[in-house]
Amino acid sequence: MARKKRAPRLTMTSINSTSPFAPDSQAAAPDRKSALAMIYLALPVALFIAGWFRPLPALGLLATLGCGLFLALRPTWRASPMVSGRTWAWTAALAVVAVGWSCLGGAGHLFYANSDWTIRDAVLRDLSSGAWPPSYGNTDGFDVILRAPVAYYLPSATLAQWLGIDWADRLLLAWTALGVGLFLSLVPLSSQALRWTLGIACVVLFSGMDILGGWLFYRSWPPLGTHIEWWAGLFQYSSNSTLLFWVPNHALPAWLAMALFFRHWRHPDFLRMAPMLMALLPLWSPFAALGMSPFYLLLLPAAFRARWRFFNPGNLGPALLLLAIEGLYLTLDLASVPSGSQDGLDPDFLFLYGVFCALEFGLLGLALYRDGKGPLLHVALLTLCVLPFFKMGEGNDLVMRGSIPALMLLCLLLLHILQSARIRLQDLAGTGVILLIGSVTPAQEIYRAVTQPAWAFHEEQTLLQAANGTAPAHYVARLNQPFLLSVMKKPSAAMPSRGSAQ
């Protein structure tokens, strides 16, 4: 009797190549959705150049950006339509999710906005009501200017300068929802209703198991609506909803970049897009750029095999010039920002580190490993293991924000497995338990958003007023770099609104 053949074990490769619900495989060609995501990331960079630099340097940099973007997006011209086999009903459903999730996050102030929005409102207000770059006085003979990743605010602030400051927060809500919608359109979601719904739930509720960490260390359960992600004290890895509710300026570029990378990194045309994608990130979030950089190592073998695609001066040259300009701007007075490595790797730290890694991503990584193993998962897990040993920023922002791409990679791998027609939902029971425990964290954030009172956009407060009269080191710096002094516009004082407290 002929021996019965064993069914092939399901892997990410088989999902990518055979699933009817996998149009967004890791080898998919860049398409029009990809182009829209790149344009979304590029528009604020163009506004920054036009607003911060003198006319002649601005024209040169805008030409550089335009040339680089043109060559990066050229392969998308021959791509399929944006809907790509999905009905307009699914597109409308994604739009509803994007708008609803963004509203809950605090943009637009329709629901409760977390405390970080006080400073964020002040930055938006200063960019919406005066000339660029805003100035906050003079120190040691140098103008103290807004030195921050400002890309998230610039489109809304530009329109608010025309329409009035009253429109600023509503415009920021629209800009945020557009970014979330573009991101959701890029993630692997099934066209089958149940799997689509589960996929959206996974995105919104994706998180580490913070509730277990808090109970293990404090033997108590937090009240409803509590922010529970600082249970480890030294560092945190944030849930998707936490990121959107607290730091959309960091989350959106990291999510879009990782979604593009996940869809296309095995396709040769992505080599043309990759340099410009990295060049657009620092002005949005330098931590997102740092978090993406380990994944770029996976492109090197293909880049050296197809040198003209990646190392073409038309692709690489504009990206390097933009990175240099953004780097000079973002590193002004960098020494004033706390940074370094963790102090002392004693047994207590190592125990905390081990528990943190296990609960935040380790157990989920093991659950995903059978069907999601591959270089992307390896790089993500290694990145998440290494980050807690370093610190940078007032609240250890390097760990909190540099981890966003790797955490999103885990979420995308989960979605990719979930959407496969060959995966039975009961096969994911163990993973489901991990996700269900983790969902307590975003549930806390959502509960707080809908139960706490909304508060109005503070259109009268400058950044200094919102920071109680002190200049926050991670938002301002002296314009003391000779090259930038020669090419930037003269800074303009950020003036308080009429009637505001002086």
Image: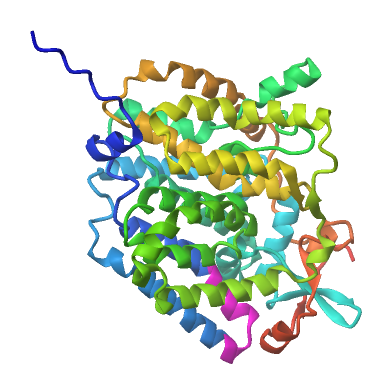
What quarter of the picture does the C terminus occupy? Answer: bottom right
**Percent x, y for residue 212?**
67, 20
Residue 447 picture quarter: top right
**Numbered disc total:** 0
Q: Is residue 50 magenta?
A: yes
On the image, the x and y values in percent for residue 121 come to 70, 56
Between 46 and 97, the one nearer to me in the picture:
46
Q: Tell which residue pokes out farthest to the bottom in this image.
A: 56
Which one is in front, 232 or 363?
363
| Residue 38 image offset from top left, x and y in percent | 43, 62
Residue 474 occupies quadrant: bottom right
Residue 382 in the magenta stretch? The answer is: no
Report whether 76 appears left or right of 493: left
Residue at 59% in and 25% down: 438
Q: Residue furthest left?
A: 1
Assign the magenta stretch its main secondary structure.
helix
Residue 129 in view: no
> Where residue 497 sits in the image (x, y, percent)?
78, 68
Q: Residue at x 27, y 45 (%)?
A: 88
For residue 80, side relative to residue 334 (left or right): left
* Quadrant (top left/top right/bottom left/bottom right) for the N terminus: top left
Magenta range: 44-57
- Determine which quarter of the picture holds residue 154: bottom right
Q: How is the image coloured?
A: rainbow
Q: Which residue is at 30% across, 64% downward?
A: 76
Q: Is residue 33 above or below residue 315?
A: above
Rendered residue at 61%/75% (across/down): 324
For the residue pair 205 and 91, the one nearer the viewer reads as 205
Position of 211 relative to 252 (above/below): above
